[in-house]
Amino acid sequence: MPGLRLRVPHESDFGSRLRSPAVAARVGLWLGICFLIAFLTGVYSHLAQAAYPWFPVPTQPSWTYRVTQGLHVAAGTAAVPLLLIKLWSVFPKFFARPPWRRRRALVLHGLERASVGVLVAAAIFQLASGLANVGHWYPWAFSFVATHYAVGWIALGALLVHVAVKLPVITQALGRDLEDTELDRPNLAADAPGLSRRGLLQTALIAATLAVVSTAGSTVPALRRISVFGVRSGQGPQGIPINRSAAAARVETAALAGDFALTVVHGDRQLRLTTAQLAAMPQHTAVLPIACVEGWSATGEWTGVRVRDLVALLDAPPESAVLVRSLQERGAYRGSRLPANYVADDQTLLALRLGGEPLSLDHGYPCRIIAPNRPGVLQTKWVSMIEVEL
Ligand SMILES: Nc1nc2c(c(=O)[nH]1)N[C@H]1C(S)=C(S)[C@@H](COP(=O)(O)O)O[C@H]1N2
Ligand SMILES: [Mo]
């Protein structure tokens, strides 16, 4: 083709004044807030799941994890349109020519570019992998949990470097009027008619709000009806969504077997309790949410035996921690640990019933753990054994 000549564009080829520090700094600020919320709630989620002895997670208020994890996913969702607009607004910089002749400036330029590269890659990775996880879509071989957590720290580090490097421009841009053109790239024509900066920022906010409102029904009951893109918006047997079904966990036969009995172990003593024996013990009811790491949550009225009472049957010290095992033979969530403060809580139950009826098979029949302020992944279903930690 005679007319076609490939040429790398130059920064000055992008004529719009919408692509300006005034816009980039403002959208960047909102994006930074979203990332900070996602980072802090993500670290909290990690600590709640890891249960390090040096970070005891309180059991009350029982809704903490529901709120932090709902915020985590909402902040990530809002960040998607904001990140796209932010990248668009700074895109011309991608084609800025490095200051080849000045050594010091060149080094600084290179470092700045490298940190931006890490930040952009980490940000895209976090949002894409997080959304894929919410959708139960794992088109990769690495462990989502470990990788998403590690890249979170990388993103935070790159974000801090980026803000530090850009601080002079950020403070100048935020201190000036939105329409001020002083900081714009040189030689831009006067504003062309069309979308204004204010219009672009409003669009960004509307897009972020729409993204959140159309998904947050997964955890905010008032939004259930309008959250058309919400994953698992409150549907499921007994009014609560199912994450892994009994069939998927391959526990159907064992859970429905007539001779099921729960084993409680303390050192060399052990006890086997049939479902009827469990039901004959003092029953307690707690209204508690299942709050999944994927951001959805739903409240149920659970009835069953206090884990504390089970531990007491074997004369174990009341401040014991316990290990929980399920009938499931494979999978990361087939067991969990209840730290001592969880065992001690009145609301920590081995639930037999949900909403007044026996647990459905998919909710963990014959019995499951339900405890206050606990990540969903640790609310072990189809419990077969409770072992006091020595
Ligand atoms: N044995 C077992 N228990 C499990 C799981 C599992 O895969 N296996 N999934 C967990 C996860 S990720 C969540 S969010 C909750 C969901 O409980 P539900 O299906 O009753 O809503 O169960 C938890 N308990
Ligand atoms: Mo979950």
Image (cartoon, rainbow, N blue to C red):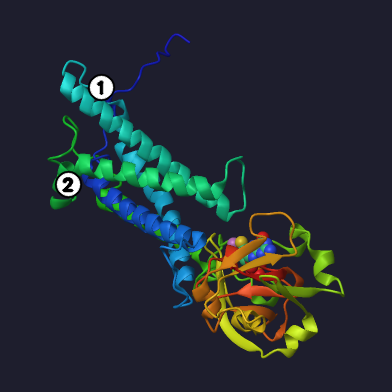
User: Horizontal and vertical percent for residue 45?
Assistant: 47, 60
User: Horizontal and vertical percent for residue 276?
Assistant: 79, 85
The furthest residue to the right = 258
Q: Residue at 30% x, 26% y: name it.
A: 95
Asked whether residue 352 is in view, the answer is: yes
User: Horizontal and vertical percent for residue 70?
Assistant: 47, 65
Identify the mark at residue 173; answer none if there is no mark.
2
Q: Mark 1: is the Cβ under 8 angstroms from ligand 2?
A: no
The furthest residue to the top = 2
Horizontal relation, residue 323 to residue 182: left or right: right
In the depicted view, which residue is nearer to us: 211 or 319? 319
Q: Mark 2 or mark 1, which is nearer the start of the sequence?
A: 1
Q: Residue at 32% x, 31% y: name it.
A: 114
Does residue 162 lie above or below 36 as drawn?
Answer: above
Horizontal relation, residue 300 to residue 181: left or right: right
Amino acid identity at mark 1: Arg
At mark 1, the secondary structure is loop
Measure the alpha-carbon separation of dots 1 and 2.
23 Å
Tell me the quadrant of ligand 1. Answer: bottom right
